[in-house]
Image (cartoon, rainbow, N blue to C red):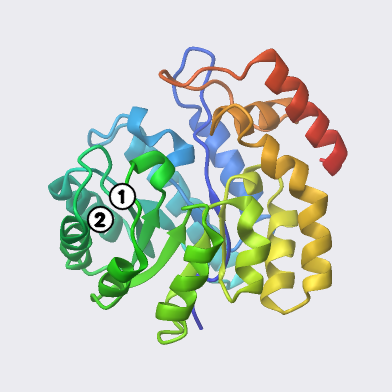
Amino acid sequence: MNKFRGSFTALITPMNVDGSVDFDGFRQNVKFQLENGITGLVPLGTTAETPTLDERPGEEEDKLIQIVMEEVKAAREATGKDIPVILGASSNNTKDAVAYVERAKSVGADAALVVTPYYNKPSKEGIFRHFEAVSKVGIPIIVYNIKGRTGVNIPTDVLVRIAKLPNIAGVKEASGDINQMMDVIAQIKNKKPEFAVLSGDDGLTLPLLSAGGDGVISVVSNLAPSRVAELVEAGLEGDFNKCRKMHYALAPMFKAAFVDGNPSSIKYAMNYKGLPAGTVRLPLVEVTGDAKKKIEAALDECGL
């Protein structure tokens, strides 16, 4: 069975008022996720504000990783469930990306999430060679395709080549293009069933599941893990009446979570509901007053 199948939370990094990391709040959030049926966790991704975190040995990133691995280990021992940890391991410098993947392997993560190189705007061959390099580390790789943040889309023909490399376990598809996502399923997953196709957009989870996808790496599940997990489970079991109903019940929050940027919007929602979130670090800023009203309205409409 594909272990990268289900609902995975792209964890926020809660901050104190002074901008320091709220490690106790982070541990509380991890426990909240594990107690509410989420399949797995994705620390140090985009939603974690990873580019602003201190990556020096023993500092913020290492401490966050330690907390996740401690809590997941305890949950595994208590429940007997396999709870995958997909650790963010991205850089536009291939050498650094390899080092981050090596870190993921060394701490016992189940996979590394590796984004398309950003800013450099590599060619198709450059994209392929980037993933070829990280694939050699010897840990499952989830390819992260998100043109809106990187400026570069991974065309399906390139992903077909990448998927043939050793240790390439799946893709987080955040291109926003459901047709491209279906092409990935048709050209890769239908020939390699163990290849996971995960939505990178909460709002596209339903159509992706109906097309044969495997789940979602979710932002909204920071706030509502049990409901996102139930939505995905229904879709994976083929109960699309339930899946569709749950999708529309959460749809206002799927929009509101990005109304004024991520993770600023979801952090405001979490603060509003009393979950540890706190501030964001520059260059991100707090959501506007108008955005706050929209987020609050969505929370009410969704019953959150």
Q: Position of residue 80 (x, y in %)?
A: 58, 73
Q: Which mark is residue 89?
A: 1
Question: In which quadrant of the rendered image does the C terminus lie?
Answer: top right
Q: Which residue is mark 2?
A: 101
CB contact under 8 Å: marks 2 and 1: yes
Whether residue 276 is situated above or below residue 122 in the rendered picture: above
Whether residue 28 is situated above or below residue 284 in the rendered picture: below
**Secondary structure beneath label 2:** helix
Q: What residue is rendered at 63% in x and 70% in y? A: 209
The answer to whether one can see residue 204 in this image is yes
Q: What residue is rendered at 42% in x and 18% in y? A: 282
**Observer-nearest of 186 and 54:** 186
Q: Position of residue 92 (x, y in %)?
A: 22, 43
The quadrant holding residue 130 is bottom left
**Observer-nearest of 85 and 253:** 253
Q: Label 2 sits on what residue type?
A: Val
Q: Position of residue 214 (x, y in %)?
A: 56, 71
Left or right of residue 70, residue 279 in this image: right
Q: Label 1 sits on what residue type?
A: Ala
Which of the marked residues, 2 or 1, is nearer the chain's N terminus? 1
Q: Position of residue 31 (x, y in %)?
A: 61, 48
- Residues at marks 2 and 1, CA–CA distance in whole angstroms: 5 Å
Q: What residue is rendered at 25% in x and 47% in y? A: 117
The answer to whether one can see residue 109 in this image is no
Q: What residue is rendered at 57% in x and 51% in y? A: 201
Whether residue 184 is situated above or below residue 178 in the rendered picture: below
Whether residue 123 is situated above or below residue 81 in the rendered picture: above
